Image (cartoon, rainbow, N blue to C red):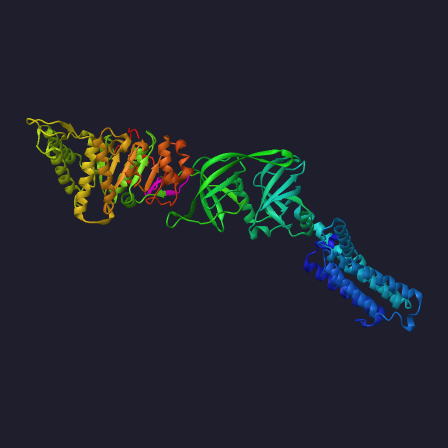
């Protein structure tokens, strides 16, 4: 069977079959005087030719003959021979019997070869395997319909028609023309080849040949010396299944045999079905040849994909990827990839975003102990972006191996009013629910100068805006300046003066009852009075700023002797306890609530609520325990806290452990990172020491992202300009964060 017949389309083969059958009918009319030959021995030639055409290269078996098909054809041919009355009186001569015997031996040989090929195909012994293969080759070559039915035809032609020269000549020429030479296939092949020259000249150029596959979807190509491909070039190449398809060039890998090109097959049906339809190109692709293609020969889906590859393809999904973490084999180094970058990969039909948290170098052994080094990026799953809700949906599965991974392009995003920050270099916002900040407590952790205070100021403004009362205990005095718009400085100064007068006056107040001496009790009562007014929902201001270190409050430390007793001033820790317990007491009188009412902000929390091993005195330890107890009880009454510190190790874990929402900026100390592992996991905890300024890992109930994420925080100036739409902007410059 010719290669031309193999490459013809089914419709073309059917059309040619119709024409050939018409030619046989004409031959029958000329030779026998009838359009349809009789079903006796004088018509054997016709039906043999028809069987060869039908079962041969034009319809049933256009490519190769399987052993089972060879058996079927040999049985049909044998029945035709056995039906011939060769031993009758009219044909009692040795020549006819020889022809019949030779034909029958041929048919029997095909039958036996086909049977043995099937019977021995699973043989475990090498000689039997070779014998089975030999039988397969024989059944394929000799059992081809055109060959086996030609044997029957020649027997019938010589035996039944040699006595009539016209019949002999016409029937013989018909067979030679329609079954032997097959001019229509040759003509169709010529037209196709000429068409392919013009059709593929500008769309396909040989690039090389396929040398292997990496499952799934990766094809390895040995390029010709004079050609080459670059990232994103579209190729026509054989897929792993052996079918022609469209691939896109990735990178080059070095092997002992040279440099191989890796390409990714495009799996979308609209892409896979656009390969050139000419048979020559299909045959060449099936044989393993690879061609480059221009956009004109491929289609919009593939060309658009190629453009995306050239612009932002980063790599491929690598082994060890799981539901939560993505491993990426990076195939290019020209993209601006960094910690916090967003990646996009498809899981099913949905594009899912991941965030880069780590990068490592890897090495694998190739042929002949050669090695290949490459970079692997590690990324955590964020989810699928829902533009309507402006948040991420969870996708509880993982991408397929070798799925392409794209880098989300960098964007210069404006500050979103509802966002505390964005994913670095993108417009994807991360929102914070101010109410959940309070009801589930929050912490801002990081070293000096990375943006902690600016973030805390922003969170306070957001809570104030939604009507939450804020009591800020600030040792730095920065909040009073930055948030002057939101509190009554004059009224607070008057209250401070009143409290300070009460506190200072206690130095000489000695009582026989130690707990009644000094001014601590009177001071606490006046604090509660002030907070009762402030925490009243009708109070016009939502922010109160206090510095516990500025108050002088005396307590009696010993029993009196001759109207004298040991006196000491309360530490900032003890003043903090007074304000915390007074706040809880006022809110308890207002009744239980599951809504956020008040947030206590502990700035420089390591000094206000220290860990037990970092206290200066036993009094501080007792005070911190009292503050922690109040915070623990406060949730039932709408009380929460915001903890800000640069020394995570020195803040009481009794309160930190109650902080459900955490903003972790750059942290160095081992204790702090070990503590944060419980919240953000080892992956994100490992990046804390390398975070840039104004970057933070955010996690908790108040975040719009369910899992920890690394974000770029808002700039203070931009936030003020965007957020303060109703109030005049305070000066936000010149403050060390």
Q: Name the one closer to the observer, 194 or 212.
A: 212
Quadrant, the N terminus: bottom right
Residue 102 left/right relative to 728: right
Residue 405 vertical placement versus 93 (above, below): above
> Looking at the image, which residue sits at the far right?
93
Q: Name the one closer to the observer, 310 or 362.
A: 362
Q: Quadrant of residue 339?
A: top left
**Whole-percent x, y for residue 316 in the image:** 53, 42
Is residue 438 visible to us here? yes
Residue 629 vertical placement versus 548 (above, below): below
Residue positioned 73% across, 58% down in the render: 119
User: Where does the magenta region start and end?
Assistant: 415-429
**Whole-percent x, y for residue 693 in the image:** 37, 32
Q: Is residue 422 magenta?
A: yes
Secondary structure character of the magenta stretch overall: loop
> Looking at the image, which residue sits at the far left?
562
Residue 57 left/right relative to 536: right
Q: Is residue 656 magenta?
A: no
Residue positioned 15% across, 40% down in the render: 528
Is residue 26 visible to us here? no
**Whole-percent x, y for residue 35 in the image:** 79, 71
**Whole-percent x, y for residue 420 in the image:** 33, 40
């Amino acid at each position: 069977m010719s290669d031309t017949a193999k490459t013809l389309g089914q419709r073309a083969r059917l059309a040619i079959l119709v024409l050939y059958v018409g030619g046989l009918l004409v031959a029958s009319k000329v030779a026998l005087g009838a359009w349809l030959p009789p079903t006796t021995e004088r018509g054997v030639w016709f039906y043999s030719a028809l069987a060869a055409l039908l079962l041969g290269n034009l319809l049933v078996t256009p490519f190769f003959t399987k052993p089972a098909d060879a058996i079927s054809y040999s049985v049909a041919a044998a029945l035709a021979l056995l039906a011939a009355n060769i031993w009758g009186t009219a044909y009692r001569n040795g020549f006819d019997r020889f022809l019949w015997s030779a034909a029958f031996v041929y048919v029997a040989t095909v039958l036996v070869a086909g049977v043995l090929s099937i019977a021995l195909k699973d043989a475990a012994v090498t000689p039997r395997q070779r014998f089975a293969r030999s039988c397969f080759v024989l059944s394929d070559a000799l059992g081809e319909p055109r060959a086996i039915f030609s044997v029957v035809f020649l027997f019938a032609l010589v035996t039944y028609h040699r006595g009539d020269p016209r019949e002999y000549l016409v029937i013989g020429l018909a067979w030679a023309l329609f079954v032997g030479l097959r001019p229509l296939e040759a003509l169709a092949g010529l037209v196709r080849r000429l068409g392919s020259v013009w059709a593929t000249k500008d769309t396909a150029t040989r690039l090389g040949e396929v040398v292997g596959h990496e499952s799934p979807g990766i094809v390895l190509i040995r390029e010709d010396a004079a050609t080459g491909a670059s990232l994103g070039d579209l190729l026509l190449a054989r897929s792993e299944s052996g079918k022609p398809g469209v691939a896109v060039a990735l990178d080059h890998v070095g092997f002992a045999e040279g440099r191989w090109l890796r390409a990714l097959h495009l799996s979308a049906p609209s892409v896979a079905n656009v390969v050139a339809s000419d048979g020559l190109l299909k045959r060449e692709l099936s044989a393993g040849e690879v061609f480059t293609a221009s956009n004109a020969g491929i289609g919009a889906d593939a060309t658009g994909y190629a453009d995306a590859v050239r612009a932002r393809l980063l790599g491929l999904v690598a082994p060890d990827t799981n539901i939560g973490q993505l491993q990426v084999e990076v195939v290019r180094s020209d993209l601006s990839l960094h910690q916090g970058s967003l990646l996009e990969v498809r899981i099913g039909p949905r594009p899912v975003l991941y965030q880069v948290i780590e990068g490592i170098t890897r090495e694998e052994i190739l042929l002949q102990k050669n090695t290949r080094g490459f970079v692997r990026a590690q990324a955590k799953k964020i989810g699928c972006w829902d533009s309507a809700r402006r948040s991420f949906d969870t996708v509880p599965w993982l991408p397929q191996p070798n799925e392409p991974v794209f880098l989300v392009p960098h964007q210069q995003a404006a500050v979103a009013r509802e966002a505390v920050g964005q994913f670095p270099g993108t417009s994807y916002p991360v929102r914070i629910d101010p109410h959940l900040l309070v009801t589930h407590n929050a912490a801002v952790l990081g070293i000096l100068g990375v943006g902690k205070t600016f973030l805390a100021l922003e969170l306070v403004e957001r809570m104030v805006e939604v009507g939450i009362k804020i009591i800020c205990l600030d040792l730095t005095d920065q909040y009073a300046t930055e948030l002057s718009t939101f509190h009554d400085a004059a009224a607070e100064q008057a209250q401070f003066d009143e409290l300070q007068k009460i506190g200072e006056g206690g130095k000489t107040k000695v009582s026989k009852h130690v707990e009644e001496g000094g001014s601590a009790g009177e001071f606490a009562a006046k604090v509660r009075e002030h907070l009762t007014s402030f925490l009243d929902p009708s109070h016009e201001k939502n922010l109160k700023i206090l510095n516990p270190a500025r108050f002088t409050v005396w307590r009696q430390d010993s029993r009196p002797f001759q109207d004298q007793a040991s006196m000491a001033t309360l530490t900032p820790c003890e003043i903090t306890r007074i304000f915390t317990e007074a706040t809880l007491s006022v809110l308890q009188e207002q009744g239980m609530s599951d809504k956020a009412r008040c947030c206590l902000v502990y700035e420089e929390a390591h000094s206000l609520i220290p860990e037990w091993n970092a206290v200066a005195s036993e009094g501080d330890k007792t005070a911190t325990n009292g503050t922690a107890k109040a915070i623990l009880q406060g949730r039932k009454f709408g009380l929460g806290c915001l903890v800000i510190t640069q020394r995570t190790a020195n803040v009481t874990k009794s309160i930190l452990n109650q902080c459900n929402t955490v903003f972790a900026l750059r942290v160095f100390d081992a204790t702090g990172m070990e503590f944060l592992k419980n919240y953000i996991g080892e992956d994100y905890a490992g990046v804390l020491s390398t975070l840039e300024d104004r970057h933070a890992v955010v996690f908790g109930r108040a975040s719009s992202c369910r899992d920890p994420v690394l974000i770029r925080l808002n700039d203070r100036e931009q936030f003020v300009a965007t957020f303060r739409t109703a109030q005049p902007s305070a000066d936000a410059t010149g403050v060390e964060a």
